């Protein structure tokens, strides 16, 4: 048997409006009446409907999180960081995976608005050339604080936490140069995304600083996915004048790059050197010492959620809150230059 508010009102001898005020802790109710209602609720073993309560309050204790690829460990770490803070504040989280598709991001935003979320953390899929009026209208009229993580939404001003991608890519490329490499390839991410643009800029900055020529034949546009990086690496390895080192702009692409190298029965760094952006934990498990740029992913999630809570508690704040975290270069030997194996 399902117990309803009307059942409680009948047993307690009060109106349904009074029951609603007690359940939502809103409006005045006499102490003795409130105690009587709570006693009846306990006796009838009544459990309030969370959705109904949120509708009556016109808000929930829930935040929305949107990421482009739930299968990517990078975003898994970001979500863990968000979840740590969500749990501390006894909040709830609704998660959406957009598969890097703008239409799915728009759909997620619409659904989250219907759920009356308190706030939103988003790793945007959208890029400047994809932004449309529908997207801007939805995200700007969401009616809640919004925090960006590792991505930008053009024509908007939201709080955000980011990684210094230029510095990370510069240091990764510089490690190759200091090791003796002169022919360095890069596999970029999707070039309509700000992180990919910044990582390419860091690569170019390092070459310029060390007076190495910037050659377009060593720049390959990837898409953050493993399969594309696999294909590009095969192309790099088959060049007449192949690069001796490959800077890979994301963790999933690092896996694709390694797959291609090992299929060719080549060794790292004897045949080709590699540095990847973002940690790939499985490589340590397999005993593969691959150098990488370590972005503080879990920390990004924590800081993003703390920003969101600050926005919820200080809705009148006027200034933007934006933090850029510094990545760490972790050298494990795969960046080295073994001259006897290179022409």
Image (tube, rainbow, N blue to C red):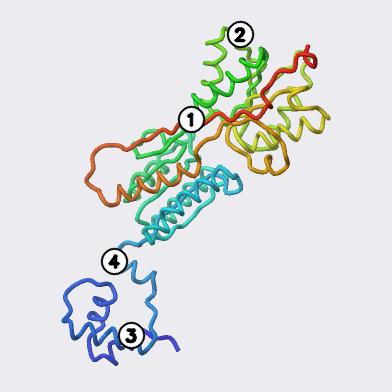
State the residue in front, 114 or 25.
Answer: 25
What is the x, y in percent for residue 35?
A: 23, 84
Q: Which mark is residue 213?
A: 2
Mark 1 to mark 3 CA distance (whole Å): 54 Å
Q: Which element is circle 2 on? A: loop
Q: Does residue 80 sit above or below 297 in this rendering?
A: below
Of the two numbered discs 2 and 4 on the same chain, state the one appearing first in sequence. Answer: 4
Q: CA distance from mark 2 to mark 4?
A: 62 Å
Find residue 289 and report its horizontal and vertical position in percent: 69, 33
Q: Residue 343: image x %, image y %? A: 78, 11
Whole-number angstrom distance, CA of label 2 to CA of label 3: 76 Å
Residue 245 location, quadrant: top right
* Viewer-proximal residue among 173 and 71: 173
Disc 1 marks which residue?
194
Tell me whether the residue at label 2 lies in contact with that at label 3, contact meaning CB atoms closer than 8 angstroms.
Answer: no
Mark 2 or mark 3: which comes first in sequence?
3
User: In the rendered view, would you say 135 is above or below 28?
Assistant: above
Q: Quadrant of the N terminus?
A: bottom left
Residue at the image point whose x is 62% and y is 28% from the top: 331
Which mark is first along the chain, 1 or 4?
4
Q: Position of residue 46 (x, y in %)?
A: 38, 83
Residue 100: quadrant of the picture: top right
Left or right? Give the position of 167 relative to 114: right
Does the CB distance between marks 4 and 1 fall below 8 Å? no
Q: Crowding near pointer 1: few (<14 within 10 Å), some, many (20+)?
A: some
Name the mark nearer the viewer: 2 or 4: 2
Q: Are marks 3 and 4 in contact (CB under 8 Å)?
A: no
Which residue corresponds to mark 3?
41
Q: Is residue 166 above or below residue 132?
A: above
**Is the residue under label 3 in contact with that under label 1 (CB below 8 Å)?**
no
Q: What residue sits right under mark 4 in the picture? A: 57
């Amino acid at each position: 048997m399902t117990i309803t508010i009307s059942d409680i009102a009948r047993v307690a001898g009060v109106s349904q409006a009074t029951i609603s005020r007690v359940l939502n802790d809103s409006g005045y109710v006499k102490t003795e009446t409130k105690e009587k209602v709570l006693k009846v609720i306990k006796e009838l073993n009544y459990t309030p409907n969370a959705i109904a309560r949120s509708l009556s309050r016109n808000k929930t204790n829930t935040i929305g999180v949107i990421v482009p690829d739930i299968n990517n460990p990078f975003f898994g770490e970001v979500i863990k960081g968000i979840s740590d803070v969500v749990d501390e504040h006894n909040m709830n989280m609704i998660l959406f995976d957009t598969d890097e598709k703008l239409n799915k991001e728009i759909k997620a935003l619409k659904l989250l608005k219907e759920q009356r979320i308190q706030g939103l953390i988003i790793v945007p899929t959208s890029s400047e050339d994809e932004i449309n009026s529908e997207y801007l209208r939805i995200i700007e009229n969401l009616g809640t604080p919004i925090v960006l993580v590792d991505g930008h939404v053009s024509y908007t001003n939201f709080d955000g936490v980011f990684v210094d991608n230029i510095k990370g890519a510069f240091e990764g490329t510089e490690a190759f140069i200091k090791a003796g490499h002169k022919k360095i390839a890069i596999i970029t991410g999707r070039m309509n995304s700000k992180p990919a643009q910044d990582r390419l800029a860091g690569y170019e900055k390092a070459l310029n600083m060390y007076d190495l020529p910037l050659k377009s034949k060593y720049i390959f546009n990837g898409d953050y996915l493993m399969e594309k990086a696999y294909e590009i690496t095969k192309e790099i390895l088959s060049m007449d004048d192949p690069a001796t080192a490959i800077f890979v702009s994301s963790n999933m692409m690092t896996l694709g790059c390694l797959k291609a190298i090992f299929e060719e029965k080549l060794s790292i760094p004897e045949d080709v050197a590699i540095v990847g952006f973002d940690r790939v934990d499985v490589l340590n498990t397999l005993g593969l010492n691959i150098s990488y740029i370590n972005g503080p992913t879990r920390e990004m999630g924590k800081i993003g959620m703390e920003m969101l809570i600050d926005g919820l508690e200080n809705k009148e704040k006027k200034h933007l809150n934006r933090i850029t975290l510094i990545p760490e270069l972790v050298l494990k030997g795969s960046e080295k230059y073994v001259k006897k194996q290179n022409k």
